[in-house]
Image (cartoon, grey):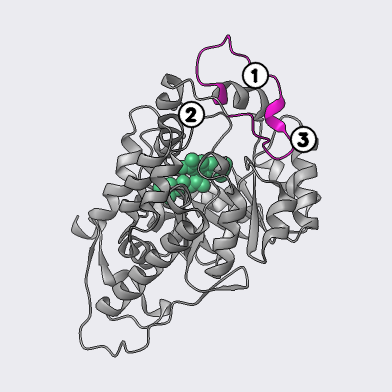
Amino acid sequence: YVTNYRLRKKHMTAELVNVMEFQELAKKVLPKMYYDYFSGGAEDEHTLRENVEAFRRITFQPRILVDVSNVNLSSTILGYNISAPIIIAPTGMLKLAHPEGEVATARAAALCNTIMVMSFSSTCTIEEVASSCNAIRFFQLYVYRRRDVSYQLVQRAERYGFKAIVLTADTPRLGRRERDIKNKMVPPPLKILEGLLSVELDPEKGGSKLENFAAKTMDPSLNWKDVEWLKSITNLPILIKGVLTAEDARKAVEVGVAGIIVSNHGARQLDYVPASISVLEEVVEAVNGEVPVLLDGGIRRGTDVFKALALGAQAVLIGRPMVYGLAAKGEYGVRRVTEMLRDELELTMALTGCSSLEDITMSHVRTERDRL
Ligand code: FNR
């Protein structure tokens, strides 16, 4: 399972014009097992397709004759200024995409003046990422049965200048990813943060090795009360990732989180949950402006970013496209993907008659709800 470096080099000079072309190139250069790991979803991959398709069913209601000679995308999240409301989602094991893994991704985030959410399942350490550049970094947390592991990582993230904890709450167990099962997806002998993957894997059980590993380590008893525990061990603001209902959004606000991320984990957990964009409006209504609401899942175009903002997201997170950028062209690729989405968003704003993010409203889009 080796990356096709020659092919990657050959394509290095090719100018790609959109995010989908990065995916095509990533598919060419990555070993199938790793491409499948990055691109796949749970079971029938219904939600995986829906995440993208649901954006296509939302159309625009542009306004004409608006002065858009200056379009301003600058944005603020938890008080941090970023160049556009587009941030990097936490994705695991980035050294499988590129030898520089999370460090290259963080550097690209710094160059683009945006936020990187570093995954708990990273292949570079907190220290390596922190010392590589001055990107604004959030740390994504899974809670393990061994609470001391999570505790120590939170302490280290805080010590090394991470600005927030993103608690991923949709993974009491790993979703059934059949591509990984078929490929017998085995994480390579890479250190995952504290060498967590050196925990003994059980090759006898069916499923992918990743699945077996997660079953042994993830704490399925994690519940709302544990958010209090998390608050007691850190002073950092906590965002909760994986909210898909108004009911859970209210609970999150009540336990005092600093923000909510509407997400179905890129359709890698429970299949047949709705596309995340389809539930955004009801979550935003339930939250009623008390905390910021962010969204991820299926964003492949600046037009998609605009649609999410119009339906009430303060910003979006981008998962797979960043990984494809990284696989195809390393740090430069992640930078290009971020810039492409930003440029497309800027053009969409101009063409819909919005010169600032505040100008983007629900009245600029037409959703299925409107058509009922
Ligand atoms: C993820 N995601 C994820 N989420 C998380 O909280 N912790 C993690 O370690 C990972 N790892 C991970 C690996 C890979 C390969 C993917 C594709 C996704 C989910 C991620 O943060 C995000 O929710 C989705 O990727 C968003 O959907 P798109 O942008 O990939 O469509």
Estimate the spatial distance between the alpha carbons at disc 1 and disc 3, rounded to whole Å: 20 Å
- Within-10-Å neighbours for mark 1: few <14, some 14–19, many 20+: some
Above or below, 351 relative to 175: below
**Residue 200 on the magenta segment:** yes
Q: Secondary structure at mark 2?
A: loop
Q: Position of residue 69 (x, y in %)?
A: 32, 89
The type of residue carrying mark 3 is Arg
Nearer-the-camera pick, 124 or 44:
124
Please give the label number shown on residue 201. Answer: 1
Mark 2 = which residue? 1
- The residue that mark 3 highlights is 147
| Closer to the eye: label 3 or 2 | 2
| First of labels 1, 2 by sequence position | 2
Q: Callout 2 environment at 10 Å: few (<14), some (14 to 19), or many (20+)?
A: few
Residue 107 screen position, x and y as percent: 59, 61
Which span is picked out in magenta? 188-210
Find residue 274 and report its horizontal and vertical position in percent. Answer: 36, 42
Residue shown at 28% from the left, 50% from the top: 54
Residue 95 inside the magenta-drawn segment:
no
Instruction: Describe the element under mark 1 as helix, strand or loop.
Output: loop
Near mark 3 (Cα within 10 A), the count class, few <14, some 14-19 or many ≥20, is few
Left or right: 195 in relation to 250: right
